[in-house]
Amino acid sequence: MVSAIHAQEGDLLKDVDSGPEKEYVTNAFKSSRVINGHSMELIGAGVLDFRILHRFGQVDQGSYEMFGLDQASMRMGFDYGISRNLTIGIGRSTLRKEFDGFLKYRLLQQSKGKNSFPFSFILVGGSTLYTLKSADSVKKSFNSKVSYYYQGIIGRKFNSRLSLQLTPTILHRNFVEAGDKNETFSLGFGGRFKLSKRVAFVCDYFMNMNGFPKERFEDPLSVGIDIETGGHVFQLHFSNSAGMNERAFITETTGKWGKGEVRFGFNLSRVFTIKKKAINKLS
Amino acid sequence: MIVLNIHKQIITKQILMNMKMVISMVLLALISIAGFSQEKYYTKSGKVSFYSKAPLEDIEAQNKNAVSVFDKSTGQVEVSILMKAFEFEKSLMQEHFNENYVESDKFPKSVFKGTITDLPEADFTKNGKYSTTVSGKLTLHGETKDIIAPATFIINNGMISVISEFKMTLEDYKISIPSIVKDKIGREVKIVIEINYELLKR
C-alpha cells in the first residue's frame, strides 16, 4: 500500500500528459546564407540583417598580393523579415556594379511531435541588374543587363549539429555570350555541421546541369566556418567564386580548386530588431 | 480445560488481527480512491515569465504553455515547461536562449516537482488569499537543484490560482555565459509563475 502511494509521488504530470506537441524545428543554419547561396533559414519578423560580404583575390597569387588579400570585392546588403515566413532583401556588389534583390518565402517548415513534417520547403525568387559600362562602345540595353533566378530549397535539420539542404535553381540571363544558354539549371548542395555551440562548419556547392562553356567556367564550391558572437555572425570561408549574388557565383566562377585558384572571403551579418514582438508581461 | 482456553484465546486474537488488517486496508484503499478522484487540479496554459536585468539590455521572456498538476489533498505540485515555448521580444534573443544558453535541443523541458510545506494553514474551501511555501526540486538545463519559493494561492468559488515569484542564478544550472557578453547578461534571473487551475476530471 505504502509503496503504491510512494510510486504515485512525482508522477502527477502523467495524468495530463498528451504526448509531445507539434514543435517547429528552428536554427538549422546560423545565417540566412549557407555561404553564397540561400540557406533554409529565414530571419525573424521585424529583424533587419545588415550584411557585408568580402571576397579577396586568388590565394595562388602569392605573397606579393598578400595571397589575394590586397584585392577585395564587396557586396553590401540589407535583408528584412516581413514575417517569420517571408524575408526580402536588396544588395549591391562592386563586381560588375551589380544590384540584386530577392523575395524568400517559407511554404513548409520542418516540425516534430504531433502532425510533424520531415523537412522545410522555401521558395526564393530574385533578380540582378549590372550597371558596369561596357568596355567597347556598344551600348547594351537595360534588359540585357537583367537576370532572374528561382530556387526551391528543400532542407532538413537532422539533429542539433547536422543540417543538409538541396537547392534546385533556374537562372535566366537576358543576354549571354555566343555558345552559352540563357537558362542555367543548377542543383545546390548546402550543409552545416556544428562544431561547438557557436562555431559550425559549412559547405556550399552548386552543380551546373547545362549552360556556359565548361572549359572556361567552374561549379562554385565554398567551404568555411560560421562563428557567432552575440548579434554578429561571421562566416569565414574559401571559395573558387568571386561572385556574391546568384547570377555571379553560378555562372561566373572561374577558379579551379585543384590549382589553388581559391579566394578567402567573409560574410559579416549584424542583425537589428526593428519591430519588437509584443509579449504580455507578468509583473 | 486450561489448554482449551488458551487455544480459544489464540483463535480470537487471530480473528481480531485479521479484522484489523482488513479494516486498515479498506481505509487505505478508500483514502487513495478519494485522492485519485477529486483532489487534483491541472492546467496546460500556465504562464511563466523571466526577467534578467543587466546594464546594457534587460532580457525578458514569457511562456504561456506551462503544464501543471496540483494535488490538493497532498499539497504536491508539478510544473513542466517547454523551453522552446518561451517568447522573447527579439527573435535573436530567443535563438540564443535556445541554442546557446539552455540548449533546448538537448534539454527540451524544465520540470519542477515539489510540495506545499505549510498546507494545513491554507483552507482551500473558503474564498481568499493564502500565503504558502513551496519547496521541491527544479530541473533545468539537465541540472536539478532544491528550491524554496513563496506561493500565494487565491481561492475564488472553488477556482484555484497560484502566483509565485523567486530568483535563481544561472551558475546553479550550469548555464554558461561567454566572456564576450559577460557584462550584458545578468547572473540572477527573476521567475514569475501564474497558474489558473481547473479540476482534473478522470
Image (cartoon, coloured by chain):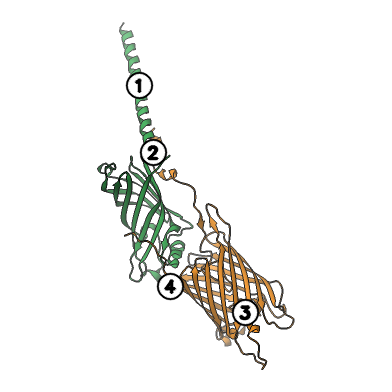
Chain colours: A orange, B green
Instruction: Please tell me whether residue B83 is drawn above or below residue B124 in the rendered image.
Output: below
For disc 4, the marked residue is A274
Task: In the displayed orientation, state which residue is furthest to the bottom.
Answer: A137
Q: Check disc 3 and report the residue beneath it.
A: A248
Residue type beneath disc 2 = His
Q: In the rendered structure, which amino acid carries the disc numbered 1?
A: Met
Q: Chain of mark 3?
A: A
Q: Nearer the viewer, residue B160 or B182?
A: B160
For the point 57% across and 63% down, which residue is it? A107
Instruction: Give the residue pinned by disc 1.
Output: B19
Cα separation between marks 1 and 3: 92 Å
- Give the foreground label among 2 and 4: 4
The residue at 58%/76% (across/down) is A238
Q: Is residue B100 visible?
A: yes
Q: Residues within 10 Å of mark 2 (few under 14, many from 20)?
A: few
Task: State the quadrant of the C terminus of chain B.
Answer: top left
The vertical placement of B59 against A16, above or below, is below
Q: Amino acid at mark 4?
A: Ile
Helix, strand or loop status at disc 4: loop
The kind of secondary structure element at disc 3 is helix
